[in-house]
Amino acid sequence: MAQTSESQSSGGEKSEDGSILVPFTLRREYLHRETGFGSFFLEMPSLVEDISKIHKNPYPKVVLLVNDKDKNQKECLKIIRDLNHENILRVEFWEEVSNEPHIRVYVEPYTAIISELFQNFESLINPRTNMIPSQSLEEIVSATMGALDYIRDNNQYHGNFSWKTTFYHLVNGNVIVKLANFERKNSNDLLQCQVEDVTSLGASLEALSQHLKDNYPNVKNYTYCLIDDLARKLKSVTKDSIGTVKRDLQDHEFFWDEKRTKIFFAYEVPGIWNDTAIQNRFRLSPSMPTLPWTAAWASDPLMVEMERYRSNNGLGDYDGESLADFFRFISGMYTHENELRKTLKNEKLSIDAEVRKKYPSLCHDLNAAIRGDA
């Protein structure tokens, strides 16, 4: 589909000739073929945000031109029209254009193509973790996974997914993903087509990661560990796992915020402190600390306070050669974060930030060891 800007919602302010522009949303259009006259049904005023004030081009664009009239494209338009999901571009109606090779398709407002958002490397990095993804990229991928799963639940498939075929709508600074540009494949195997939708998402993440590595060679390897691992898992989806891929991957560390990370270390890690198999797998990971691990925390106020806590509770000092004690120390800091803030008189203290300074990919590597895929 090619973009055009033949129609737009107008803005609620005076134009150059003094007239007042009232925002509207185009709902329906009827065209009399013989006379060429038509009627439009508009919603006025529109609830759609007037982004024309901040966008250099007329906005929002509501017309797509489908460059042929074959059954494939018409079938795709019917499928998209029948799918009702926030992250699938809504098709209102379409019409064939006389003596032209295209179909004019009226759709909901959108801003641009998703791939345009990925030109700025810094926008993909989470400043809290110094890793990919940023919150925005995390939300984009999560929304995409949800939309693809919705399509599968409705016994359909996309058939043409990539970042270059996906639009977005910017609303109050938030990126709303809009899947579009569906295609039909020369295959009667619906399940395989659905698998290929998901593996295409994995391949798109892999390509994005590789593009960044090629253009920013000085970035640390750990920066990419989450996006690379998620891409690998998405690419490995099969017919047997397609039905549970959203459930299986929605708790991947790629989607973890600081609260979820704290839950992991404070509530899940204590159950594996003494598991030898997990320890052995973790020893092979990039996050394995140099022993004695206590040397890296010598004289650190956090270590001083945690040792004081252990002493007051008759627990003795941490063993710098013990991985179990390393896990206890990390887990304990997350558990007692609020007390440490008060004791150290630092209300802005973030244990997650302090841990990541020394072990950037610890949550990923330890969780991988727990799952058994390290």
Image (cartoon, grey):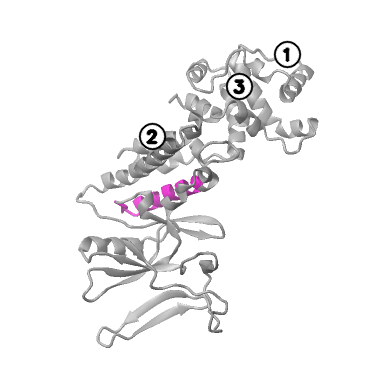
Q: What is the magenta range?
A: 137-159
Q: Which residue was labeled with disc 1? A: 316
Mark linked to residue 232: 2
Q: Is residue 30 left or right of residue 175?
A: left
Give the quarter of the image for residue 311.
top right
Amino acid bearing label 1: Gly
Q: Mark 1 falls on what kind of element?
A: loop
Amino acid at pointer 3: Phe
Residue 327, numbered circle: 3
Q: Position of residue 242 (x, y in %)?
A: 34, 42
Taking the magenta stretch, the answer to whether it contains residue 180 is: no
- Marks 3 and 2 in Cβ contact (< 8 Å): no
Q: Position of residue 178 (x, y in %)?
A: 42, 57
Is residue 69 or residue 342 the one in the foreground? 69
- Of label 1 and label 3, which has the lower sequence position? 1
Q: Amino acid at mark 2?
A: Arg
Distance, label 3 to label 2, CA atoms, is 27 Å
Q: Are marks 1 and 3 in contact (CB under 8 Å)?
A: no
- Label 1 packing within 10 angstroms: few (<14), some (14-19), many (20+): few
